[in-house]
Image: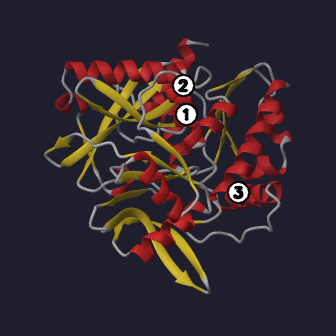
């Protein structure tokens, strides 16, 4: 196995540990930064039949900046400066560079027919474009929150809300990840507004800068909310209808379910009192068996299978879902959704389970 990854990252360490547990040889790691500079290194790494697993490049600031500069060039922009830690900067340009890199990778793999990929580059690209991904899932019959489409700015948001008769929406960066820059927006007839978000606004040197933080912020001043929405919209933003999450003792929850080889495997409830329940925001893990009745569990598993069929060239994917009253809505698909340390399914973590599945389908 070859990993296109960041050496020493948590994902790399967990997969290598799973290989050791299964008495498999150590996977060869090709760093994203090295492949971006020298694509022929992949040909050398895959010089015989084997499996390529593509991990995200985001753990490496050098690779991130490389992709950001590539995207700026493709979009006809001046090179962006290096973002500071946690800064949300030119996410649309980064995606342009990332998409181009995956297209090059896909072309390179056509000359290596003996190499199998865990997830195909084009499907990774589709899942990374959140708006396109939600449209793709809906086209394949999955229930998703109603999409309002792209948001061009604060004034456009107000027009969209009026058009759809809504006062509550989720605003999501089209190319963000892990709740970065997500905004839960609501307003009332009295004109009061509230935007709850992981994005911290920093003003200085005549510009608004955004930083992703673990401590969720709440903005209630119209000027602050407008500045936030406008800054996110400049990097590509879309809106979807608010979907209430089921209640539990710890507040409310949604679910992360992992599909391996097209079948539902690991699943966990993400429980919290805040609008965003992502686990990295210090929310709690919950036992799905204790929270879902038989109808809900059946709906979850059926939706995971259906979603996996929408991505037939992806052997491993994570799906964020809201399941209630026997219906499952897919909030997001994640090509890198297997980072769930310590979560077991049939006695194996996500990495060991996917390695076993690859062996069975070799």
Q: Is residue 187 above or below residue 246?
A: below
Residue under the point 27% across and 22% down: 297
Q: Residues within 10 Å of mark 1 (few under 14, many from 20)?
A: some
Q: Say whether residue 251 is left or right of residue 52.
A: left
Quadrant of the snapshot with the N terminus: top right
x and y percentages locating residue 189 in the rendered image: 28, 62
Furthest residue toward bottom: 205
Q: Are marks 1 and 2 in contact (CB under 8 Å)?
A: yes
Residue 144 sits above or below residue 115 on the image: below
Between 37 and 283, the residue placed more toward the observer is: 283
The picture places residue 182, in percent across and down from the top left corner, at: 45, 56
Whether residue 21 can be seen here: no
- Identify the secondary structure beneath mark 3: helix
- Residue 135: mark in rendering: 1
Of the residues under marks 2 and 3, which one precedes in the sequence?
A: 3
Query: Which of the two residues, 262 or 15, is positioned nearer the viewer here?
Result: 262
Q: Residues within 10 Å of mark 3 (few under 14, many from 20)?
A: many
Q: Mark 2 and mark 3: span between their CA atoms?
A: 27 Å
Label annotation for residue 93: 3
Q: Which residue is mark 2?
A: 139
Residue occupying image coordinates x 62% and y 36%: 126
Q: Please report the residue visible at 56 percent of the width from the left and 68 percent of the height from the top.
A: 231
Instruction: Indicate the position of residue 341 as horizontal and vertical percent values.
Output: 39, 42
């Amino acid at each position: 196995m070859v990993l296109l990854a960041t050496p020493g990252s948590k994902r790399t360490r967990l997969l290598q540990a799973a290989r050791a547990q299964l008495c498999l040889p150590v996977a060869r790691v090709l760093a994203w930064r090295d492949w971006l500079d020298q694509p022929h290194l992949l040909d050398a790494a895959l010089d015989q039949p084997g499996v390529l697993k593509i991990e995200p490049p985001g753990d490496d600031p050098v690779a991130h900046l490389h992709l950001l500069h590539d995207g700026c060039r493709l979009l006809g922009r001046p090179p962006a400066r290096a973002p500071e830690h946690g800064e949300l900067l030119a996410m649309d340009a980064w995606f342009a560079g990332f998409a181009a890199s995956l297209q090059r990778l896909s072309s390179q793999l056509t000359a290596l027919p003996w190499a199998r990929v865990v997830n195909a580059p084009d499907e990774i690209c589709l899942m990374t474009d959140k708006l396109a991904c939600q449209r793709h899932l809906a086209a394949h019959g999955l229930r998703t929150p109603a999409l309002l489409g792209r948001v061009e700015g604060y004034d456009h948001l107000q027009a969209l809300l009026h058009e759809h008769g809504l006062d509550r929406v989720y605003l999501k960066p089209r190319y963000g990840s892990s709740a970065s820059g997500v905004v839960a927006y609501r307003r009332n007839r009295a004109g009061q507004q509230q935007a709850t978000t992981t994005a911290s606004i920093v003003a200085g040197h005549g510009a608004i800068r955004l930083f992703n933080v673990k401590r969720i912020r709440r903005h209630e001043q119209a000027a602050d909310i407008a500045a936030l929405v406008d800054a996110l919209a400049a990097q590509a933003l879309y809106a979807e209808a608010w979907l209430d999450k089921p209640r539990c003792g710890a507040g409310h929850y949604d679910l992360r379910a992992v599909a391996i080889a097209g079948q539902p495997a690991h699943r966990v409830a993400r429980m919290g009192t805040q609008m965003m329940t992502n686990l990295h925001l210090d929310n709690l893990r919950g036992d799905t068996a204790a929270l879902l009745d038989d109808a809900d569990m059946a709906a979850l598993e059926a939706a995971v299978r259906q979603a996996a069929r929408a991505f037939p060239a992806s052997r491993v994917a994570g799906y964020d879902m809201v399941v209630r009253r026997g219906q499952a809505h897919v909030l997001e698909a994640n090509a890198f959704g297997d980072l769930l340390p310590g979560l077991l399914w049939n006695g194996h973590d996500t990495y060991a389970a996917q390695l076993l599945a690859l062996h069975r389908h070799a």
